[in-house]
Image: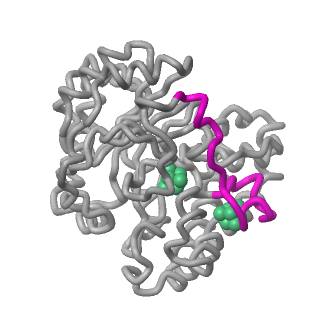
């Protein structure tokens, strides 16, 4: 199964949608030993560990110890990349995927994350190229009201030195209060949904040249529509993906150990087999006409309803727009596959759960 390892709750940034740098207190250090963690993981024969925080790279010696202690696990890292170049290259090479937080253009990234962050991130992604990192490097955006999805995705996909293999994003919804948005509905109607329509149109147009760009949310949705293979909750939370919090508790999702409803065990007392498929999304998702493609978007949002039921439906409008926009182009994509311009395998992403939630 997949486990987010929360190496610390502290962060070296204080982004406007997260306020991570304010996260202090006793759970900034691990309250379990690596032997205890290894004993828990030994009972799972297919372990994938996602190094996560807070900001995991403020615990680099711990990352190295963990990778030494668990030589057979597959590792991914989700980082703001400010200290990425401090990780010894031997350890970086073992990472299957690195998700780098960057929100789009320099102006929007620095506006959300702090002045100078964009340039520092790019410098450290260039360092990955320099040391010969061959894994998947993903630009992972948080999309909020200063974002222009069309501009920002194109900006990141168009970078060449460094370049990203894939671009993924998550909407800044539910965990950030709705009243932090000045008008979510009109942002969706006037900016986000039209931007998605343009991005999908250009994504499909490039397929004529044999190019399937690595825009993460589009790939697996198109794959589902092309193959008819439906999906469960795409982030895997509560099914085959869990978070091991700094205090040793096991949550269905990395979002926070403070939400008691998300805690399903503890590494000292629980076996991996006890928690597999322990929690699934509830209504309205299983009855939704798009459930097989969407999978339920987010277990946390489905359960906690922090924006209320109305808020959940507002977010679903973005999901339904994304799905219907891709669906409208599926006959064209099928034709391009039949003619040999592109292959169905181009859409089979990710091979392993790499921390991309897929549905923004
Ligand atoms: S579109 Fe909304 S209601 Fe439908 S499955 Fe996705 S999250 Fe659930
Ligand atoms: S999509 Fe929702 S349930 Fe899944 S990992 Fe993210 S916050 Fe958790």
Q: Any magenta on residue 211?
A: no
The residue nearer to you, when weighing 34 against 11, is 34
Q: What's drawn in magenta, residue-wise?
A: 271-296
Residue 287 within the magenta-colored segment of the rendering: yes
| Residue 146: quarter of image | bottom left
Residue at left offset 26%, top offset 27%: 63
Q: Overall secondary structure of the magenta stretch? A: loop
**Image side of residue 67 versus residue 322, left or right:** left
Q: What residue sits 58% from the left and 37% below the top? A: 275
- Please tell me which residue lies in front, 210 or 101: 101
Question: Can residue 51 be seen?
Answer: yes
Camera-nearest residue between 87 and 252: 252
In this rendering, the answer to whether 283 lies above or below 39 is below
Image coordinates for residue 339, horizontal then vertical, percent: 81, 37
Specify the color scheme.
one colour
Name the residue at 64% across, 70% down: 316
Name above or below for residue 105 compared with residue 229. below
Quarter of the figure with residue 231 = top right
The residue lying at 77 percent from left, 45 percent from top is 230
Q: Quadrant of the N terminus?
A: top right
Q: Is residue 160 visible?
A: no
Residue 149, percent from left and from top: 48, 65
Q: Quick check: 96 left or right of 205?
A: left
Q: Is residue 38 above or below residue 200?
A: above
Residue 260 on image: x %, y %: 45, 56
Q: Which quadrant holds the C terminus?
A: bottom right
- The quarter of the displayed image where residue 259 is located: bottom left
């Amino acid at each position: 199964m997949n486990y987010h390892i929360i190496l610390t709750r502290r962060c070296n940034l204080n982004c406007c949608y997260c306020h991570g740098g304010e996260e202090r207190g006793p759970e900034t250090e691990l309250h379990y030993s690596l032997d205890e963690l290894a004993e828990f993981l030994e009972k799972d024969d297919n372990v994938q560990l996602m190094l996560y925080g807070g900001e995991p790279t403020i615990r680099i010696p711990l990352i190295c110890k963990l990778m030494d202690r668990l030589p057979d696990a597959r590792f991914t890292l989700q980082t703001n990349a400010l200290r990425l170049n401090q990780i010894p290259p031997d350890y970086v090479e073992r990472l299957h995927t690195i998700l780098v937080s960057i929100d789009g253009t320099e102006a929007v990234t620095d506006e959300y994350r702090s002045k100078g962050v964009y340039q520092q991130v790019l410098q450290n992604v260039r360092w990955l190229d320099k040391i010969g990192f061959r894994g998947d490097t993903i630009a992972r955006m948080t999309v909020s009201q200063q974002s222009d999805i069309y501009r920002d995705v194109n900006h990141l996909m168009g970078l060449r030195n460094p370049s990203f293999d894939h671009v993924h994003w998550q909407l800044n919804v539910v965990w950030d209060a709705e009243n932090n948005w000045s008008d979510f509905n009109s942002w969706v109607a006037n900016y986000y949904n039209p931007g998605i329509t343009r991005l999908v149109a250009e994504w499909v147009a490039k397929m004529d040249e044999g190019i399937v760009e690595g825009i993460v949310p589009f790939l697996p949705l198109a794959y589902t529509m092309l193959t008819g293979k439906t999906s469960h909750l795409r982030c895997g939370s509560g099914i085959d993906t869990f978070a091991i919090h700094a205090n040793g508790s096991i949550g269905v999702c990395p979002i926070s150990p403070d939400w008691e409803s998300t805690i399903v065990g503890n590494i000292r007392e629980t076996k991996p087999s006890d928690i597999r498929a322990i929690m699934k999304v509830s209504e309205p998702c299983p009855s939704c006409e798009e459930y097989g493609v969407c999978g339920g978007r987010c277990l946390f949002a489905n359960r906690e309803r922090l924006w209320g039921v109305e808020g959940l439906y507002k977010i679903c409008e973005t999901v339904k727009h994304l799905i219907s926009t891709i669906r409208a182009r599926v006959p064209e994509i099928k034709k391009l596959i039949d003619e040999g311009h592109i292959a169905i395998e181009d859409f089979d992403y990710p091979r392993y759960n790499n921390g991309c939630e897929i549905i923004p």
